[in-house]
Image: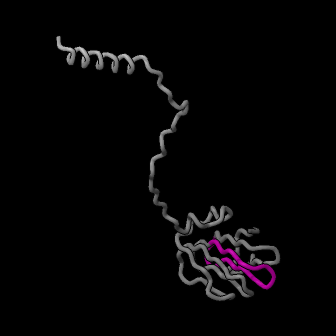
């Protein structure tokens, strides 16, 4: 064998020996599997917005009063949200959830249907008799 071949063979053997007997240094840490990116779509409807106290009213629409005194038209069961203003909020012909936005100076009336739920802060006057009465009242 020529000296060149012997040198090449020895070089390869030396490199192999170093690679198999060397010390490997690694960090002692674990990496968590990254969370998957996801997208969720949710529908926000009247049922999702109504307060828990209105659970008995199967509302299907939402209306925000446009004035302190507001009467809901129609017979669709509705979540009626009042303004922070004096006046009278009155539900419509469906089983409504009427939520007043201010205390003193506000009257809340249910509407023509039975089962209306009326909610308001301290100082609100609830109509509990007559044709437009609140069958259930409570604070919010």
Residue found 29% across the figure and 15% down from its top: 10
- Which of the image's four quarters has the C terminus? bottom right
Residue at x 59% of width, y 83% of height: 72
The question of residue 107 being in magenta is answered with: yes
Image x and y of residue 95, in percent: 60, 71
Q: Residue at x 56, y 72 (%)?
A: 77
Magenta range: 97-114
Of residues 6 and 126, the one drawn nearer to the viewer in this rendering: 6
Residue 45 in magenta stretch: no
| Residue 14 percent coordinates (x, y) | 34, 17
Q: Quadrant of residue 15?
A: top left
Left or right side of 44 for 89: right
Residue 56 versus residue 91 in the image, above or below: above
Quadrant of the drawing holding the N terminus: top left
For the point 37% across and 16% down, the residue is 17
Task: Tell which residue pokes out farthest to the top in this image.
Answer: 1
């Amino acid at each position: 064998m020529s000296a060149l071949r012997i040198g090449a063979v020895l070089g390869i053997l030396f490199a192999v020996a170093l690679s198999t007997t060397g010390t490997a240094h690694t960090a002692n840490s674990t990496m968590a599997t990254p969370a998957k990116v996801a997208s969720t779509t949710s529908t926000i409807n009247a049922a999702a917005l109504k307060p828990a106290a209105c659970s008995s009213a199967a509302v299907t629409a939402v209306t925000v009063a446009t004035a302190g005194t507001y009467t809901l038209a129609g017979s669709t069961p509705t979540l009626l949200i009042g303004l922070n203003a004096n006046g009278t909020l009155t539900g419509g012909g469906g089983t409504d959830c009427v939520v007043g936005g201010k205390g003193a100076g506000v009257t809340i009336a249910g509407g023509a249907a039975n089962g209306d739920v009326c909610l308001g802060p301290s100082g609100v006057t609830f109509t509990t008799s007559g044709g437009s009465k609140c069958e259930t009242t409570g604070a919010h």
